[in-house]
Image (cartoon, rainbow, N blue to C red):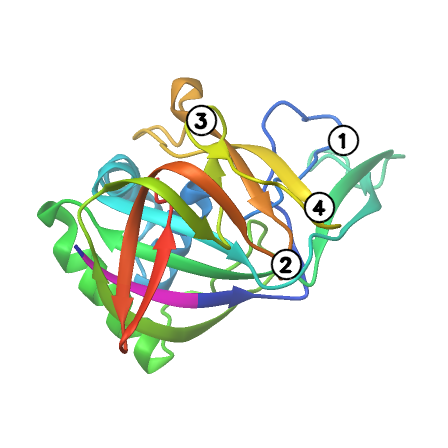
Amino acid sequence: MKGFQLIIEGNWGHFKKPETNNNPLSHDLITKTALIGMIGAVLGIGREDMKSKFPQLSDNLLYGVQLLNPVKKISWGFTSKTAINPTAPGSPKYFEFLRDPKFLVSIALFKEESRDDFESFKTAIKNGTAEYTPVLGWHNCPANLEWKSEGLFSEEKDGDFETTGFVLAGEHTPKNLTGNFRIGFDKMPTFQNDDFWNIPERYRNVIYPDCPNSITVNGKYYEYHFSDKIEKWCLI
């Protein structure tokens, strides 16, 4: 499969967990659905056209994430107002933000149906262009996007492998977990339908090593070949 990598970073990020509406919490990593929204922003695809793009790109692209900064979360309080009566007393609401998030993201073209969007996004990242400002989940959390590499992903393999990216809980078996570093867990959305709804059945439980560590697991993986190098990734 064709693939490439980019670095996504910013001062702040918030990838809202849907079950935390009153005081929203954030996922630890950039989600697949947030990445697809970012693709739409970079390519200048309007909201109505993104309705069909979300389910298509959810199925046709695979992605993986490696932390380039440790996960650090900070809560900030905001006063909630209504548009009908903005001068009325508001109620405080707390949001959880990622501080200095920085990710290495691998993207693979799984199905040819989305080749044009894949190639257009790759070209835009290479050239450092974007039609709309890409964000890290929230409109007031702008993202910086940086080209990293281009290569090919192998056919899916099975066995022991070492990776710095996330793997799937219940599908990958950790091997020899040693060392004094944090192992994180998260439940990530991987599919959004044409009504901008993250389908609960398409959430995946992931395990990831905190930066700059790696973990060794047994299970399915892809080899990423680029510049005479080989990396091993779990892609979803």
Q: Nearer the viewer, mark 3 or mark 2?
A: 2
List x then y, in percent, for residue 159.
Answer: 33, 39
Q: Give whichever of 198, 208 is nearer the camera.
A: 208
- Whichever of labels 3 and 1 marks the residue nearer the N terminus, that label is 1
Query: Is the Cβ of the residue at disc 4 closer than 8 Å to that at disc 3?
Result: no
Q: Is residue 128 left or right of residue 224?
A: right
Stretch in magenta: 2-6
Q: Could you tell me which residue is drawn at 77 percent across and 37 percent down? A: 81
Query: Mark 4 — residue?
Result: 182
Q: Residue 23 carries which label?
A: 1
* Image side of residue 9 versus residue 165, left or right: right
Q: Is tag 4's residue or tag 3's residue first in the polypeptide sequence? A: 4
Kindly report the distance in space between the C-alpha atoms of the residues bearing marks 3 and 2: 24 Å
Q: Name the residue under label 3.
A: 203
The mark nearer the N terminus, 4 or 1, is 1
Q: Which of marks 2 and 1 is in front?
A: 2
Label 3: element kind: strand
Q: Are marks 2 and 1 in contact (CB under 8 Å)?
A: no
Residue 87 is one of the magenta-drawn residues: no
- Which residue is farthest left? 112
Residue placed furthest toward the front: 176
